[in-house]
Image (cartoon, rainbow, N blue to C red):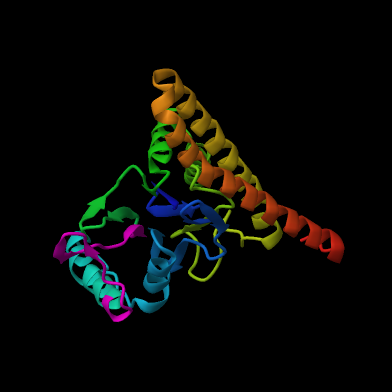
Amino acid sequence: MTIIVGTIETDHVYLGADSCASHGCLLRPFHQSKVWRQGDLVLGLSGRVRETQILRYLTELPSVPTDGDLMPWLVGPVIDAIRSARKSAGHDERIEGQSECEYGPVLLLGVRGQLFGMHGDYSVSEYPDGAAVGSGEVAAWGSLRTSQAVGVSNPRERVRLALEAACAHDIYCAPPFSFVDTESAPGTPGPGQTPIQPEIAIEQAIESATNVAETRIRNLSQELIAQMFASPAAHLEAGRVTISPEIRFIENFSQTIGEVTDKRSTTGDNS
């Protein structure tokens, strides 16, 4: 899962993203930034790793119009280019039960001081006050609204606060964060757009996974207690079946962290 956040300030767009990749109950640090600069555009995609790779490396986007309304360009040539690349890569998913309907990527796109969102049905929306997409978007939207209301003027700071809010309230979002903007020259890192260091990623991934484990145990405990009080006999077996996979997740997580710690201690590698 993912959180992508975007803001606008003085004709520039700023994007930020987390670095979590998930598959079921498994969380892994994602070492490729989910936000990037592509010519005059900045983009951030929420979805499968393969979708990000297709959009970033296999999609030739059309040149940005120098003036005029951008919406016809987005809903026409841009979407056509994305659909063509996805089809060529064998990733043109269909909506279940609707074989004629494709399921497109969910992303934020910044260009010419405007922020747009593309949705799963290939519709496009413009967001003049900032936006968020991904599993942690509810908390991020709330943070964007609050930071605007209390007068936080730095756009990068607003993005960072929204990312932190998402990671605090959604177990499938996790630091470290990466940033990109249209203010910096293409090919150069913008302020705050530092590379993801492996040693930082490992430590923060461990911390995030620990929080995930603790949250799952706490939530399951509360649910099971409520169920037992409501109808002990009916929910006892259901509770055992529900919590068993989570216990295995914790055991596997603990074993993996132990192996990593032992290896680092043995080799003397502090990274």
The stretch in magenta equals 87-112
Residue at left offset 40%, top offset 34%: 142
Image height of 91 relative to 75, above or below: below
Residue at left offset 33%, top offset 53%: 115
Q: In the displayed image of the protein, which residue is found farthest to the front?
A: 233
Q: Seen in the image, is 5 located left or right of residue 80? A: right
Q: Nearer the viewer, residue 211 or 121?
A: 211
Residue 130: quadrant of the picture? top left
Residue 13, horizontal then vertical, whole percent: 40, 54
Q: Nearer the viewer, residue 54 or 143?
A: 54
Magenta run includes residue 108: yes
Q: In the displayed image of the protein, which residue is found farthest to the bottom?
A: 88
Residue 128: quadrant of the picture? top left
Residue 106, horizontal then vertical, whole percent: 32, 57
Residue at left offset 15%, top offset 66%: 99
Residue 39 in view here = no
Residue 25 in view here = yes
Q: Seen in the image, is 270 located left or right of residue 149? A: right
Residue 11, horizontal then vertical, whole percent: 37, 53
Image height of 88 relative to 168, above or below: below
Magenta run includes residue 186: no
